[in-house]
Image (cartoon, grey):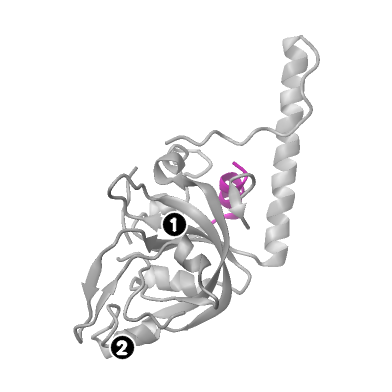
Amino acid sequence: VQPKKRGRPVKASAAALVKDVDKDDTEDPVEPPKKRGRPAKASTAELVEDVDGDGDAMAKADNAEEDDQDEASGKQYWLMKAEQEDREETARDGTVSNTRFTIDDLREKTAPELWDGVRNLTAAKNLRAMRKGDLAFFYASGGKKGRKPGITGIIEIVSEAEPDVTAESEDSIYYEAHASKRKSWVAVGVEFRQKLETPIYLAELQEFRGPGAVLSDMQLHTLARLSVSKVSPKEWRFITEK
């Protein structure tokens, strides 16, 4: 499964980390979020434990409230992979296209960009489930010449699923030769929202994928080859509040 890439002449169109508001990558550690709660002023272990307990309870209550707010609003979160390496591919008609597409490329767009070229049924299902106003992590896939895969920014879904016209275009590297399969492929409109001052690399995220860890069920880890994956509100908060 290929990560999101740009092709043909492509028609288709967190938080101190933030600067401005389908590959199996393998790569360092993110510290767990700090507990909320007043600092312990007493010197006894008992009082310290009480304070820590209060902080944990407060954090859990806050998180539960935020989960309820997310459910009430209907907002969903996603992770969408794009190729950060220069690589040329040739379309059926001989057109050569570079597959590289970065968060900076998206920032330069003056109109919504269609996120096309997804050719995996589960990833396409996730695209169909997206709703206007949802947010997604922009994930730079691949990693050569010292580059590492990881989250580089945040984007917003601004238009919902529509047929992916690149599936029918022979001048596109995403052309679908089997006509019966073309209707399976869709695209959504996205816009740039934020770029991280420092990327959150895959290796850092993997520090929290062990049994019982906060990111243990994240699709980025459980379905690593998906180019478009779900992110739970809990996972989103953990990553963006670092």
Image coords of residue 62 (percent x, y): 74, 44
Q: Secondary structure at mark 1?
A: strand
| Residue 140 occupies quadrant | bottom left
Q: Which residues are magenta?
A: 231-242
Tell me: 230 left or right of 39: left
Residue, x 45% and y 38% (percent of image)? 211
Q: Sequence order check: which comes first, mark 2 or mark 1?
A: 1
Observer-nearest residue: 183 or 149? 149
Tell me: 36 left or right of 210: right
Residue, disc 1: 139
Residue, x 31% and y 68% (percent of image)? 99
Q: Identify the image quadrant of the C terminus.
A: top right
Image coords of residue 79 (percent x, y): 48, 59
In this rendering, the answer to whether 105 lies above or below 10 is above
| Residue 139 occupies quadrant | bottom left
* Mark 2 Cα shell of 10 Å, populated few (<14), some (14-19), many (≥20): some
Image coords of residue 73 (percent x, y): 71, 66
The disc labelled 1 sits on which kind of residue?
Tyr
Residue, disc 2: 169
Observer-nearest residue: 166 or 84? 84
Q: Main secondary structure of the magenta part?
A: helix
Q: Is residue 239 magenta?
A: yes
Residue, x 72% and y 11% (percent of image)? 45
In this rendering, the answer to whether 42 lies above or below 124 is above
Q: Is residue 92 magenta?
A: no
The disc labelled 2 sits on which kind of residue?
Ser
Residue, x 56% and y 46% (percent of image)? 239
In this rendering, the answer to whether 51 lies above or below 64 is above
Tell me: 17 left or right of 228: right
